[in-house]
Amino acid sequence: MIRYLYRKSRILFVGINPHPGSYARGVPFSNNKMFWYLLSDAGLISETRDALGDDAALKRIYEARFNAVYGLGLLNVVERPTRDVSGLHKGEEAPGRKRIARAIRTQKPAVVCFIGKVTYARFKGSREVSFGWQEDIGGAKVFVMHFPLRGKAAVRVRELRRIARAARA
């Protein structure tokens, strides 16, 4: 099970749902560490690839530093783990939509970053979604980034740097 850390985040990342491997480890995006490597490459966290690649070290980083030191948070639209989004049921995102909207309203992150178009589409309830900046939600800037597992890492690093700059503004 993943304990979601998001209180007082500057940047709140929103994923669609956990992978079973990540869920078992208790760390988001730990099945494939690419999200963590991208955060490091973009300068949002200061951790070595060796530490990020080690499950025990990554769990310590997530629990002790991700939110408290780096000011980052993460929630998923759906908490139930599946191998991919095709395992999700229609309407399953409704409780998560409310939970995330409440977190944005109460925690007031500077930026909310939806990880992938599918995530934002499920949150918004619309198929018409594009990458990049979206309409603000509750005073937070909203960005839809490319999913970390496919495509060129340089694109995602640039996106994360844009998000970091916006969170500092």
Image (spheres, rainbow, N blue to C red):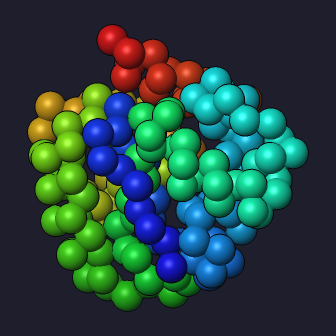
Report the side of 141 relative to 15 (left or right): left
The C terminus sits in image quarter: top left
Residue 101: give x, y in percent of width and height. 18, 55
Of 147 and 37, the residue lying toward us = 37
Report the side of 43 relative to 102 (left or right): right
Of 81 and 94, the residue lying toward us = 81
* Residue at image coords 65%, 74%: 25
* Residue at image coords 74%, 55%: 57
* Residue at image coords 26%, 70%: 96
Of 16 and 86, the residue lying toward us = 16
Asked if 92 appears above or below 22 in the picture, the reply is below
Residue 167: give x, y in percent of width and height. 37, 22
Report the side of 55 relative to 30 (left or right): right
Residue 166: give x, y in percent of width and height. 38, 19
Picture quadrant of residue 50: top right
Residue 91: give x, y in percent of width and height. 26, 82
Whether residue 12 is visible here, answered yes or no, is yes
Asked if 45 appears above or below 88 in the picture, the reply is above
* Residue at image coords 47%, 23%: 164
Picture quadrant of residue 127: bottom left
Whether residue 155 is visible here, answered yes or no, is no
